[in-house]
DNA sequence: TTGGTGTATTAGTATATTATAAATTACTAT
DNA sequence: ATAGTAATTTATAATATACTAATACACCAA
């Protein structure tokens, strides 16, 4: 592969990884890989303050890793696509299993 | 899994991902997954300035992702272990293939 | 329309990362 | 020893990120 194409790919991927490179956001991804949860539920599970949580969700959302759907007053989040699922699964396999 | 154990794992993994979350460092990992290269060779391949390159190598080294061996004046780097290889392979599979 | 609940955004400050330049260490050859 | 090359470290300035508090927005119920 030529270097400049690699550069631009690396740049995209590094932004995505950057979004995952925060312990709270990793935990969010991990939780959301198991079940769809709304913001209040995530707040309770992870013990984060609401505005902070909302900001982290925003980071993941902007990178296309998660997506939310509104149901009344709540917004339920889940992993956005197969790529996000594959990423979380790989990380789990590499770093958490045995 | 209980939350506090998850917290501490997430914290470790996020540090590791943080080390990967820079386009130059991703490119380094990618190159070094293919072949062992010394600093001068990496400098030429990636077009980075030498002190900057050395700092990026330091970040990856401290996270245990790569390791170097000195051969005379050169230091040759490669991925440090199977976990690092698995990570690079997974990232390639998820983001670069197809 | 008013008030309440759930979520998001903004602003300000503290902290961390990055790039660049200068100095330093490690090795080789003479 | 001295000089030269390869690589690392340190210092610093610029930029980005994170946390907190305050504010705003969206929806619901009365």
Image (spheres, coloured by chain):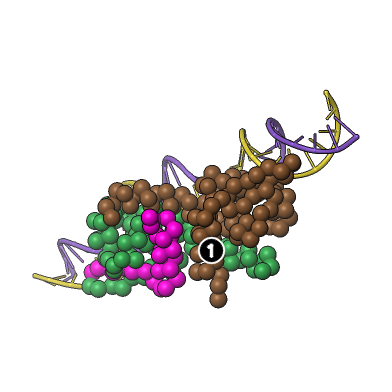
Chain colours: A brown, B green, C yellow, D purple
The answer to which image quadrant residue C5 occupies is top right
| Residue shown at the point (59%, 67%) measured from the top left | B9
Disc 1 on helix, strand or loop?
helix
Q: Nearer the viewer, residue B28 or D29?
A: D29
Instruction: Compare residues C13 and D6 and report the one nearer the observer.
Output: D6
Front residue of B89/D13: it is B89
- State the residue position of label 1: A89
Q: Is residue B86 magenta?
A: yes
Q: Quadrant location of the N terminus of chain A?
A: bottom left
Residue A52, placed above or below residue B76: above
Q: In which quarter of the image is residue B12?
A: bottom right
Look at the picture and state if D23 lies above or below B8.
above
Q: In this view, does B84 lie to the left or right of A66?
A: left
Asked whether the viewer can see residue B19, the reply is: yes
Give residue A50's position: percent from left, percent from top.
70, 47
Give the residue displayed 63% in from the left and 61% down from the top.
A34
Q: Give the range drawn in magenta.
A: B73-98
* Residue A79 percent coordinates (x, y): 58, 53
The residue at the point 44 percent across, 63 percent down is B90
Q: Where is residue B31 in the image (x, y as percent from the top left)?
A: 31, 61
State the residue in front, A81 or A87: A81
Q: Please count the marks in the image.
A: 1
Q: Is residue B25 visible?
A: no
């Amino acid at each position: 592969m030529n270097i400049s194409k690699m550069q631009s790919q690396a740049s995209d991927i590094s932004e995505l990884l950057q979004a995952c490179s925060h312990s709270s956001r990793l935990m969010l991804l991990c939780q959301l890989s198991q079940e769809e949860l709304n913001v209040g539920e995530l707040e309770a599970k992870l013990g984060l303050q609401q505005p902070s949580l909302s900001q982290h969700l925003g980071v993941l959302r902007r990178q296309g890793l998660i997506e939310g759907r509104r149901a009344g007053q709540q917004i339920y989040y889940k992993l956005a696509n197969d790529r996000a699922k594959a990423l979380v699964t790989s990380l789990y396999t590499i770093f958490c299993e045995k």
